[in-house]
Every structure is written in C-alpha cells, then in structure tokens.
Image: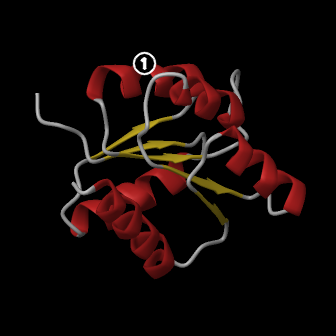
Amino acid sequence: MEQLDVLVIDDDANICQLLRLYLEKEGYRVECAYQGAQGLEVFNARSPRLLILDIMLPGMSGWDVCKEIRKHANTPILMLTARSGVEDRIAGLNAGADYYLTKPFDTRELLACINALLRRQGK
C-alpha cells in the first residue's frame, strides 16, 4: 500500500472533500476520517506524512487524538478548526500540534503550512 501524504480528520464532509480536492491537485495522496477514533485507526494503519486535525469531533476530541498520536509518533500535526480563541490555540499547541490554523482559512496559507511542515521533516 502506498504511503499516505495527508490524513484529514474532520467531521465536516464538505471541508474534507474541499481539502482532498485541493491537496490532490497539488500532488498529495489524501485520505479523510470523520471521527477521532476512526482517524486514529487510519493514522496507525497508513502512517501519513502529515495530519490535518479538527478539534470538535464526535466521540474523541482533536486534542485527545493529538495527545494519543504524540505518545508514539512525531508526525507533523496541523490543527484546522473554527475554535479561534487564544486559549484554544494554546491548548492545541500544548497537546502537540505543530501549527494551528483557524476556519475559514485561505488555501494558499494552508498549502504553505503543509509544505513548511513537510520540508522541516525532510521528506
């Protein structure tokens, strides 16, 4: 199975499909998961190079997903969420996220963040 470039975990199917279309156009292999636990399963099975993670997910929050992943992986995590308060951004970064971007977002900024995070990984 081919390595996955980007895993998107977001319960908003429209956001997932928009990100998938945009990132695939840029040459990335993308998969989406719509719940935290499902996302962890995909993460563990596919070892993506980067994770785009929403905070407000059914069942398991993005913060908890992030903390769980950080127990065993150093994969870049970009939190992409509507929660824009300073405390939310701090909590996301403290949970282990590498970058925090709020919705609505500019796709050019998102792509620049993805490229920077992957470049830093040297992959």
* Label 1 crowd (10 A; few <14 / some 14-19 / many >=20): few
56 in relation to 36, above or below: below
Residue 26, how many percent across, how many down? 23, 69
Q: Amino acid at mark 1?
A: Glu
Residue closest to the far left: 1
Q: Secondary structure at mark 1?
A: helix
Which residue is nearer to you in this view: 7 or 112? 112
Q: How many marks?
A: 1
User: Can you tell which quarter of the image residue 19 is in?
Assistant: bottom left
Q: Quadrant of residue 41?
A: top left
Where residue 119 appears, x then y in whole percent?
30, 64
Name the residue that disc number 1 marks: 41
User: Horizontal and vertical percent for residue 32?
Assistant: 41, 40
Is residue 74 shown left or right of residue 119? right
Residue at image coords 21%, 54%: 123
Picture residue at 80% right of the left edge, 63% below the top: 84
Q: Position of residue 88 (x, y in %)?
A: 82, 52
Would residue 38 be found to the left or right of residue 117 on screen? right
| Depth check, front residue: 23 or 113 | 113
Q: Is residue 86 left or right of residue 15?
A: right
Quarter that holds the N terminus: top left
Q: How is the image coloured?
A: secondary structure
